[in-house]
Image (cartoon, rainbow, N blue to C red):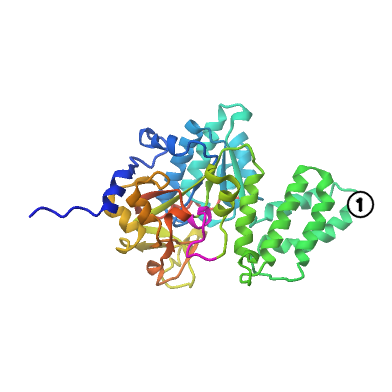
Amino acid sequence: MPLPSPDPTTASLARAAVPLRSLSADAPTTDLQPLRQVLDGVRIIGLGEATHGTREFFRLKHRLLAFLVRELGCTALAMEASESAAPAVDAYVRSGVGSAEQAVAGLGFWTWQTREVLAMVEWMRTYNRQRPASERVRFLGIDPQKCGPSLTALDTLLGRLPAPERNRATALLAPLHTLATAHPGSQPDPERQLVRGAEELSRLLTPYGSDAARHARNLVRAADLVTRPRQHTDPEQTVFAVRDRYMADALEAEPSAKIALWAHNGHIGTTHHGGGALRPLGSHLRDRHGDAYYALALLFGSGAFRARRTLPGPWQNRRARTRDAKVPSHRIGPPAPNTVEAQLASATPTDHFLDLRTAPEPVRAWAAVPHPHRSFGAMVPRWTYHLHHTPVTLTATYDGLAYIAASSPSEPFPHPTA
């Protein structure tokens, strides 16, 4: 008896898939050459991730960044990381100031304190070392969170101000020091006192140079996030919507740069997972740049990834003494049959890329209706994470997909001593 023919969607997905032969940044780029046509005319390339703790996602992003820089003229990497701390990473990759370990650790998120991100930062430094300043690739942070470096910089600056301005700025800055450790949405304040103080400080310091103005602006954004509500009758007034809007605004400060954007799938997509009125970062970029923005989601089949648990438990390694012991690994089996990942794996079980903009009609028809897919943030439910799926309409949310068959946990590096 002859074998049944695959359904049209599976067959079309298999034909449209572009195999990824390697995840190494040093590998030949023959398999990436189809991206030249896909990304023609694109200025901002969103590189997503279904988890914040998958080694293979980070390695693929490193490889794609190297390709984009070397062959497609990319001039900056913008990351879902502290805009206050990012200048230290930029100083390292462009001029060799400080150390890569200290700069990456200073970004403030456990998600990026990994050997994979460190290797990417070291690659950027190596690439830049033999190039003139005008041709060096930059590192940008776009997240208003983790504003401690801006507070430190302004503390130093105040000592150089004339007495009247110094006294007023000191009074305004004092309550803002709570922002260094406060979480977004943790201090809802309808009166917006922290924000008003940060805005006055910004107006006061603007005449004292671009660095002072930049750090003060960072505090305005950080204060806004901390005091925004998590829930509101208008979703665009919530901390989640405001954070993504600020991250989009940060990219507008680089109007001539060709940017690789590193963030979670939930941010780089052009619609909110699960529907609703909340607008992600990618939605703002699509409105502002049209098809010059390309959202590439990274998905995986099975394996393991790192994430914090929402509840503590005895499975933690209590003997470990590093910060990274608090971020355990989570195993997960093959995707459920009705998911996006299962359909991709059925068509092409190995690592591959799929461009949705030019996909054949059976693929576009499949991608135009909602399907569940995996999306894990920095924290997951302790027992039920493997059951978690969110619906997505692929053609409305992403421009392309990269499927990684096997996920393994990202590898932390020890927090460097000062």
Q: Which residue is at the front of the view, 175 or 339?
A: 339
Which residue is label 1 attached to? 163
In this view of the protein, can residue 73 be seen by the observer?
A: yes
Q: Position of residue 16 (x, y in %)?
A: 33, 44
Numbered marks: total: 1
Q: Which residue is at the front of the view, 217 or 410?
A: 217
Q: Amino acid at mark 1?
A: Ala
In the figure, 407 relative to 320: above or below? above
Could you tell me which secondary element the residue under label 1 belongs to?
Answer: helix
Q: Which residue is at the front of the view, 321 or 375?
A: 375
In the figure, 356 relative to 194: above or below? above
In the figure, 161 relative to 333: above or below? above
- Position of 298 compared to 91: left or right? left
Q: Quadrant of the N terminus?
A: bottom left
Asked if the stretch drawn in magenta spans residue 370, the answer is no
Residue drawn at x 83%, y 44% is: 208
Q: Quadrant of residue 355?
A: top left
Magenta stretch in the rendered image: 265-276
Q: Position of residue 221 (x, y in %)?
A: 70, 57
Q: Position of residue 410 (x, y in %)?
A: 43, 53
